[in-house]
Image: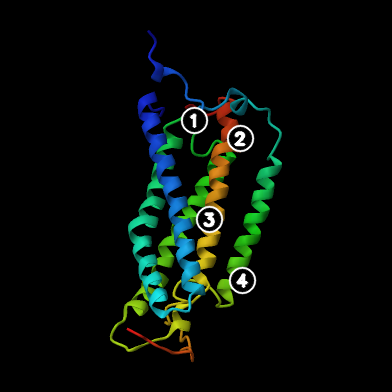
Amino acid sequence: MADPSATPDPADAVPRSADREPHTGTPRWVKVFAVVGALLILLLVVMLLAGGHGPGRHTGSRGDAPSSAVIEHSA
Amino acid sequence: MAMPPRLRKLALTAHVASSVGWLGAVAAFLALSIVGLASNDPQAVRAVYVAMDVSVWYVLLPFSVASLLTGLVQSLGTSWGLLRHYWVVIKLVMTVFATVVLMLYTETLAYLAHRANDTSSLTVDVDDLTRASPVLHAGAALVLLVVATTLSVYKPRGLTRYGRRKQHGVLQP
């Protein structure tokens, strides 16, 4: 009896068509991902340079002004 | 280096479990952060920020690192490879990015949890704790992880330049 574990697992085996596809350049979906990713990174860089984002921004280490809305702790 | 079938299934199970666990943990974190942003109850806000800090260290970070490591094992140990298919490369970049941002964000959460846990003061500055930042970070992480999961399921076609060279046998396996 054949070992069932030797059967290729469709969940992680590379389909033959995917490994033997013709050279047609970069797929369109990759280009879309690249454009969206580049725009998001650009947005992130602008926010970092503007000082509105980034590590330490929320820790008060950059002189965050204390809020005026102080609520009495009921405990 | 191809893994034997049983080891490959074990690695795949570990990868799926850690990735799905990460996604679920981010969803729970998003719910907490929304409560922290919307609640008017100072005690609830304090509790939420302490809970978020704990969940990052004991759930989110372990799951994210596990997802990254098991993903590396899964790709290197199967014929998919790490750099042969665009979907694998993009998923790797997204996972590394999300893990690094999460690690950096622990500083913010530690600060917020410290402020929330500060019982030395009789007053709590709720506006100082109530921020949109955790909601935005968790929302972005959720979108990113859903996209990564979709890539894993659909496995869209597309060989990288390296993958094409391997396909034509220029590089030895």
Which numbered mark, 3 or 4, is in the foreground of this view? 3
The tag on residue B89 is: none
Residue projecting furthest to the bottom: A68
Please, what secondary structure does the residue beneath circle 1 have?
loop
Q: Can you identify the residue that label 3 sits on?
A: B142
Q: Can you identify the residue that label 2 sits on?
A: B159
The image quarter in which residue A23 lies: top right
Q: Can you identify the residue that label 1 sits on?
A: A12
Q: Is residue B36 left or right of residue A74?
A: right
Q: CA distance from mark 2 to mark 4?
A: 32 Å
Which numbered mark, 1 or 2, is in the foreground of this view? 1
Q: Amino acid at mark 4?
A: Val
Residue B58 lies, in percent from the top left, at: 33, 58
The vertical placement of A44 against A14, above or below, is: below
Q: Can you identify the residue that label 4 sits on?
A: A46
Q: Residues within 10 Å of mark 3 (few under 14, many from 20)?
A: many
Q: CA distance from mark 1 to mark 2?
A: 16 Å
Which numbered mark, 1 or 3, is in the foreground of this view? 3
Q: Amino acid at mark 3?
A: Leu
- Pointers 1 and 2 within a single chain: no
| Pointer 1 with pointer 3, Cβ within 8 A | no
Q: CA distance from mark 1 to mark 3?
A: 24 Å
| Pointer 2 with pointer 4, Cβ within 8 A | no
Please, what secondary structure does the residue beneath circle 3 have?
helix
Q: Residue at x 50, y 27 (%)?
A: A13
- Pointers 2 and 3 within a single chain: yes
